[in-house]
Every structure is written in C-alpha cells, then in structure tokens.
Image (tube, helix red, strand yellow):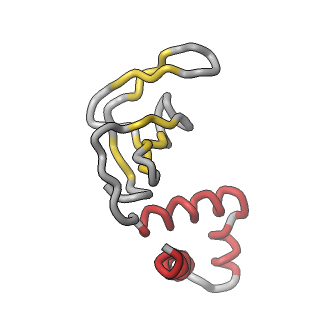
C-alpha cells in the first residue's frame, strides 16, 4: 500500500464511534485512503470522516496522483479552482501536473 492510495472496502465491517457510542457499518464498496501510519480514512458511506486502523499493512511510497486529486478536490470545493482556471484559459490537468511536480519534489 502507498500513502494516499485510495482503498475500496472489500467486505462489510463495523466500527464504534466515540462521540455517540453507536456502531456504524462500513459497507463493501465504501472508499477511503491510507495514511503514513496505516490508518484508513473513510471518505464515503456511513463511516465518512472516521479513521480505522488496518492491521497487517505495509506502507511504502506515495500515491502521488491520488494525493493530488484529494488536494484538488478540497481546494476546488472551497475556492472553485476549476472556474478560476477556466476563466484564465488553463486546463485542470495542467494544474494537477503542477501540484504533482511539487509533491514529488517534496516527498
């Protein structure tokens, strides 16, 4: 597995929530991404926003493309980057390529 890699849940499992003491079911097909410590950050389904430890996982390297897409999605949802790029005559792909270049330089 790579840091930032998108993971699709293969089978249903339950998680306990600390705040409400409720059990939520993460369903097959829900998605998340892996962090540097081997935790799955759920990004879809009933477990969205929850973080789950995944046992027996070896984290090596980075999934630059997925990290770039996550950064872009967050920035676009907040700042409407796609509209700004379009108004200035730039392609989203060019913007994503620049972010990826910076990440590969840093990481």
Is 51 in front, or is 9? 51
Vertical comparison of 48 with 87: above or below: above
Q: Residue at x 48, y 16 (%)?
A: 23
Q: Position of residue 13 (x, y in %)?
A: 35, 24
Q: Residue at x 27, y 36 (%)?
A: 10
Q: Residue at x 43, y 69 (%)?
A: 64
Q: Residue at x 62, y 57 (%)?
A: 74
Q: Is residue 23 left or right of residue 13?
A: right
Q: Position of residue 29 (x, y in %)?
A: 33, 37
Q: How many marks?
A: 0
Q: Is residue 6 left or right of residue 20?
A: left
Q: Is residue 69 left or right of residue 30?
A: right
Residue 102 in which image quadrant: bottom right
Q: Tell me the quadrant of the picture where the N terminus can be found.
A: bottom left
Q: Position of residue 96 (x, y in %)?
A: 52, 75
Q: Is residue 59 left or right of residue 106?
A: left
Q: Is residue 33 visible?
A: no
Vertical comparison of 35 with 103: above or below: above
Residue 32 in which image quadrant: top left
Vertical comparison of 90 with 75: above or below: below
């Amino acid at each position: 597995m790579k840091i930032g890699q998108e993971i699709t849940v293969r089978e249903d499992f339950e998680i306990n929530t600390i705040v409400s003491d409720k059990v939520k079911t993460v369903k097959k097909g829900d998605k998340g991404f892996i962090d540097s410590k081997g935790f799955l950050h759920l990004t879809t389904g009933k477990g969205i926003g929850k973080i789950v430890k995944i046992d027996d996982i070896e984290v090596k390297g980075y999934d630059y493309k997925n990290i770039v897409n996550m950064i872009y999605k967050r920035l676009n949802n907040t700042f409407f980057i796609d509209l700004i790029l379009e108004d200035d005559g730039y392609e989203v792909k060019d913007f994503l390529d620049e972010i990826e270049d910076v990440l590969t330089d840093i990481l």
